[in-house]
Image: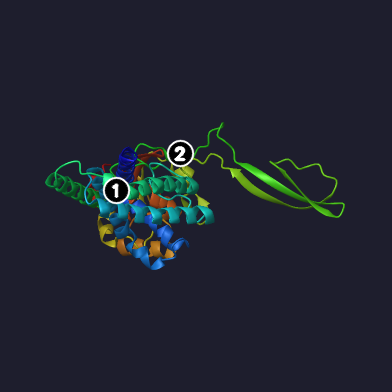
Amino acid sequence: MKYIVNISRILVGILFIISGLIKLNDPVGFSFKLGEYFSQGVLDLPFLEPYALAISLFVVIFEVLLGVILLLGFRVKFTVWSLLIMIVGFTFLTFYSAYFNKVTDCGCFGDAIKLTPWESFTKDLILLVLIIILFVGRRFITPLFRSNTIRVITLVAVVFCVVYGYYVLNHLPVIDFRPYKIGANIEDGMTVPEDAPKPIYDYAWRFEVDGEEKIIVTQGDYPSVDGEFIDVETTEVQKGYEPPVHDFTIEQEGEDFALSLLQEPKLVMVIAYDLAKTNEDIYSEVKKITDVALKKGYTVIGMSASNDQQTSKLIKDHKLDFEFYFTDETTLKTIVRSNPGALVLEKGTIRQKVHYNDLDELEF
């Protein structure tokens, strides 16, 4: 039992640290995922949405610290109880989300590792078993070092998490796992390879044959049946290839200008996914840097999911010399974790990307 407990201790501790650090690298992204859980009928707690970022920071830091103190053997009773409560909650969320198809990506490992809802649930079930082993055999979890040494290591872990979290909140994730990272070409990311897997569907054809209903299942071909066709039900049994960049449009009055704008040799995008939540105090700086870009021959556009009234008001209030285009809100949140944020592109390739706190770092 002792060896099983120690193996479980190492696996759970390392997994919690890795999972927590990946999310701590991008707490804003994790807060978006929590917002989906709060608002899409999983937890049905929409009043918590305004606090999603604070909750996400607490959860990811706590997750890292639980992994650390489990490996150190510190506060064993508190640690195993906390792990058990967390994994029971996570398992419920991932099962509910998978079974009812509420949230299609749990965000367990941020954008670094994408898991389907059922894969997330399976992962949580395995963790649940390992944590139950730790709970039952907690007497075998012994400290690795003397108590003072453990306290110092734990304090260092706390300080690191707080400082790192503060940094990425006020700038951008240190490691960008998204398809819009610096150096990526957006148009290439939208491309589907010729040999890419196609989606596979089951077609359940219903016919009336000799007064009785008959169902024939095929994967596309219309069945040869001597009877009267009633209807057909389509079920996707295998997803096809989805390019890393999808749902990307740059629209104005219903027309998509994405492909033409992505050919621009000098393009600046000012991205504000929701103008009702944007930091308006920073638009004086946005005005300065975009005026410089325009003088140097750059095409400058704004991209938002807000309506024309909001964009027109923003342009008028801050005397901005560029127009806004419509892009899906989720896509804009994925492109840059800042509201507003800015990108510099060269024929669709992202050369620079900054948080609004770092606008002065842009080079034209």
Q: Is residue 132 left or right of residue 223?
A: left
Q: Earlier in the sequence, mark 2 or mark 1?
A: 1
Q: Which mark is residue 125?
A: none
* Residue 271 seen from this side: no
- For this rendering, which residue is in front, 152 or 84? 84
Quarter of image, res 223: top right
At numbered mark 2, what does the secondary structure look like: helix, strand or loop? helix
* Residue 104 seen from this side: yes
- For this rendering, which residue is in front, 284 or 102? 102
Total marks shown come to 2
Residue that numbered label 1 is attached to? 138
> Which residue is drawn at the image coordinates 47% and 45% (left, top)?
119
Amino acid, disc 1: Arg
Work out whether 194 lies above or below 18: above
Work out whether 105 lies above or below 187: below
Amino acid, disc 2: Gly
Q: Which mark is residue 189?
A: 2
Q: Position of residue 60 (x, y in %)?
A: 30, 52
